[in-house]
Amino acid sequence: MSATETTQAALEIFRQHGILCTSEALALGIHPRTLYALRDAGALERLARGLYRLAELPPLTHPDLVTVALKVPGGVICLVSALAFHELTTQIPHAVDVAVQQGSQCPRLEYPPLRVFRFSGVAWTEGVETVVLDGVPVRITNPAKSVADSFKYRRKLGLDLALEALKAYREHVTFDVTTLLHYARICRVEEVLKPYLEALL
């Protein structure tokens, strides 16, 4: 196969698969030399170390969340990042908040910066939904769980964040008191959250 054919074949693989890790690209038959030549020529965009997509594609709508979803297998976007995604806070996350299961390792990323939280038991398994962003499945806490988590971590993140999220959730299309209290029980913050919730009802 000529160099042009090899390049075109590699580009077609990226067109079919979207975002690929280096190992995935190699497994699909792209030679490392071809991969790096495409990157150096500007045909591939480097999202993070070892993570590439076609440069000709429109910009990603949520590049940080997509990158974390691909580079932190099993991770769940949570807290400020999840609240911002669900439009429950005005805070702009300076790092991607990601939950990993207690005892598991979280890879280090050059970019985006991560803030890692360790969840266990039902706090880890409950209230997680999968949304597809830019063709990539991203695991993220749902709005009610995100609010309950913000109360759980109120000492670290600030009570003002939790209160803002609760007020915004009250106006959210998915607002449900029973669901919110269910997640508050799981996070062991039901007694803390209830007075603030009652004041809003």
Image (tube, rainbow, N blue to C red):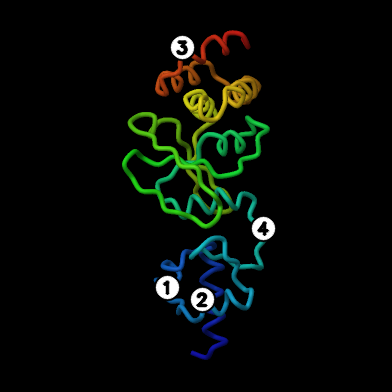
Q: Secondary structure at mark 2?
A: helix
| Residue located 51% across and 76% down the image | 35
Q: Earlier in the sequence, mark 3 or mark 2?
A: 2
- Residue located beneath label 3 in the image: 191
- Residue located beneath label 1 in the image: 26
Q: Secondary structure at mark 1?
A: helix
Which label lies toward us, 3 or 2?
Answer: 3
Q: Position of residue 157 (x, y in %)?
A: 55, 30
Q: Position of residue 180 (x, y in %)?
A: 50, 20
Q: For mark 3, does the 10 Å Cα neighbourhood hold few (<14), some (14 to 19), or many (20 or more) residues? A: few
Task: Give above or below for 27 relative to 166.
Answer: below
Q: Name the one closer to the observer, 33 or 136.
A: 33
Are discs 2 and 4 less than 8 Å apart at CB? no
Going by the numbered disc 3, the residue's amino acid type is Glu
Q: CA distance from mark 2 to mark 1?
A: 8 Å
Are discs 2 and 1 less than 8 Å apart at CB? yes
Which label lies toward us, 4 or 3?
Answer: 3
Are discs 1 and 3 less than 8 Å apart at CB? no
Q: Earlier in the sequence, mark 1 or mark 3?
A: 1
Q: CA distance from mark 4 to mark 1?
A: 24 Å
- Tell me the number on the disc at residue 35: 2
Q: CA distance from mark 1 to mark 3?
A: 53 Å
